[in-house]
Image (tube, grey):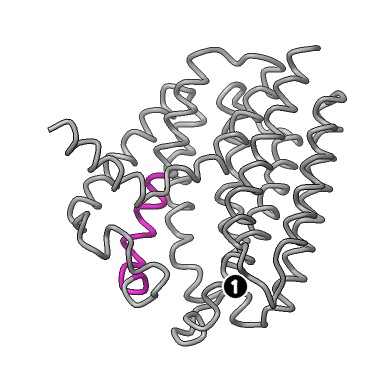
C-alpha cells in the first residue's frame, strides 16, 4: 500500500511539475524577509509556503485540464498523466478544488488583505491558460502570475503595498517571460498548426530570441533597482551580479539554430536565479 501511495504521489508531482516551485517560492520568501527586514515569524513562513504551493498546484492543474486536447496532440506533452489516464479528469477537478480551498484558508491565516486578494489571485492564475489562444503576450501574462510571488510575500508580513516588491514583480515578470519565450521555441510547428499565439510561432525564432534577451536585460535592471529601494547590502548585490552572469550564459547556451540545451537553460539555470537571489537576501538581512 505504501509503495502504491508513493507511486501515486510521484504521478501527481509529475503532473503539476512540483520541482518548478523553485521558480516562485524563493521570490515569495524574498518579499517576506525584506518586508520584515529579517525573520518574518513561523506563522507567516508556514502559511505563505502552503499558500504558494497550493496556488501553484491549482494553476498547473487548471492548465492541464484546459489544455488536455492540445497536450494529447503534441508529441512533447503526450505523456502527461492527464493525457495517459494515470490521473482522471474527475480527480483533477477534485484536486483543483482542494488546492483552491487550501490557498484561500492559508491566506486567511495570514491577514485580511491576503484573504481578500486570494480570490483575485486564483482567477488571475487560472486565466493564463487561455491567453495563448488569443495573444502573443501570453509569456508576459505568465510572468505576471509568478511576479505576484514577492508581492504576496511582502503583504503576508505587512499588509501594505510598497515599491520594492513591485520592482521585484517587474523583474520576475520579465525573467519568466524571457525564459518562457525560449521554452516555447520547442513548439513552433505545433503552435503554427493550431494557430496558437506564442511569440516564436508568430514572429519567428530570431525575433523571439531577441525579445527574450531584451526581457532579461530588464530583469537585471529591475532586480538591481529593487535592491537599491530595499537598502540592500553587498550580499544581495553579489547575488545580483551572479544572477546577471547566469542570465547571460543562458543566452549563450542556446540559439535559434541550436535548441539542444533548452532544458538546461529552462530549469537548471533559471532555478539558480531564484535560489541565488534568495540566498543574497537571507545573508543580507542576517548581517544587518
Instruction: Find residue 195 and report its horizontal and vertical position in percent.
Output: 48, 84
Position of the C terminus by quadrant:
top right
Name the image quarter holding residue 285: top right
Q: Is residue 219 magenta?
A: no
Q: Is residue 118 left or right of residue 238?
A: left
Outermost residue to the left: 1
Q: Farthest residue in the bottom direction?
A: 193
> Where does the image place residue 38, in percent across and percent down from the top left?
68, 15
Q: Quadrant of residue 177?
A: bottom right
Question: Is 254 situated left or right of 129 in this image?
Answer: right
Q: Seen in the image, is 262 located left or right of residue 60? A: right
Residue 113, compared with residue 97, is above or below; it is: above
The answer to whether 22 is drawn above or below residue 92 in the figure is above
58 within the magenta span: yes
Please give the name of the residue rendered at 56% of the width and 57% of the height, measured from the top-left corner.
Answer: 142
Q: Is residue 213 left or right of residue 16?
A: right
Q: Secondary structure at mark 1?
A: helix
Main secondary structure type of the part rendered in magenta: helix
When the figure is inspected, residue 264 is found, relative to residue 187, above or below; the finding is above
Tally the numbered discs.
Answer: 1
Q: Nearer the viewer, residue 243 or 63?
A: 243
Region rendered in magenta: 57-71
Query: Few, some or many C-alpha atoms within 10 Å of disc 1 (few <14, some 14-19, many ≥20)?
Result: many
Q: Quadrant of residue 261?
A: bottom right
Q: Which of 58 and 5 lies nearest the eye of the viewer?
A: 5
Q: Quadrant of the N terminus?
A: top left
Q: Report x, y in % for residue 13.
A: 35, 44
Q: Residue at 57%, 74% (x, y): give it.
A: 198
Residue 36: x and y in percent read 67, 18
Please report the residue visible at 47 percent of the width from the left and 52 percent of the height from the top.
125
Q: Mark 1 highlights which residue?
A: 185
Amino acid at each position: 500500500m505504501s509503495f502504491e501511495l508513493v507511486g501515486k504521489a510521484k504521478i501527481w508531482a509529475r503532473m503539476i511539475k512540483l520541482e518548478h516551485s523553485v521558480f516562485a517560492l524563493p521570490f515569495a520568501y524574498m518579499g517576506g524577509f525584506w518586508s520584515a527586514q529579517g525573520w518574518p515569524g513561523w506563522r507567516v513562513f508556514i502559511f505563505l509556503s502552503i499558500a504558494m504551493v497550493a496556488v501553484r498546484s491549482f494553476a498547473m492543474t487548471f492548465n492541464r485540464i484546459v489544455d488536455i486536447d492540445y497536450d494529447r496532440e503534441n508529441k512533447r506533452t503526450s505523456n502527461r498523466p492527464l493525457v495517459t489516464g494515470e490521473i482522471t479528469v474527475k480527480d483533477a477537478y477534485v484536486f483543483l478544488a482542494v488546492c483552491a480551498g487550501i490557498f484561500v484558508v492559508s491566506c486567511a491565516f495570514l491577514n485580511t488583505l491576503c484573504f481578500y486578494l486570494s480570490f483575485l489571485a486564483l482567477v488571475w492564475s487560472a486565466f493564463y491558460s487561455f491567453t495563448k489562444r488569443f495573444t502573443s503576450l501570453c509569456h508576459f501574462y505568465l510572468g505576471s502570475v509568478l511576479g505576484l510571488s514577492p508581492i504576496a510575500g511582502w503583504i503576508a508580513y505587512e499588509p501594505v503595498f510598497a515599491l520594492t516588491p513591485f520592482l521585484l514583480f517587474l523583474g520576475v515578470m520579465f525573467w519568466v517571460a524571457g525564459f518562457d519565450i525560449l521554452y516555447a521555441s520547442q513548439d513552433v510547428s505545433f503552435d503554427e498548426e493550431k494557430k496558437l499565439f506564442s511569440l516564436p510561432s508568430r514572429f519567428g525564432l530570431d525575433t523571439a530570441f531577441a525579445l527574450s534577451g531584451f526581457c532579461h536585460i530588464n530583469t537585471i535592471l529591475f532586480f538591481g533597482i529593487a535592491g537599491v529601494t530595499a537598502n540592500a547590502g553587498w550580499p544581495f548585490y553579489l547575488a545580483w551580479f551572479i544572477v546577471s552572469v547566469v542570465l547571460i550564459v543562458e543566452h549563450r547556451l542556446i540559439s535559434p539554430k541550436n535548441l539542444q540545451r533548452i532544458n538546461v537553460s529552462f530549469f537548471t539555470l533559471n532555478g539558480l536565479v531564484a535560489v541565488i537571489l534568495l540566498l543574497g537576501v537571507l545573508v543580507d538581512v542576517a548581517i544587518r
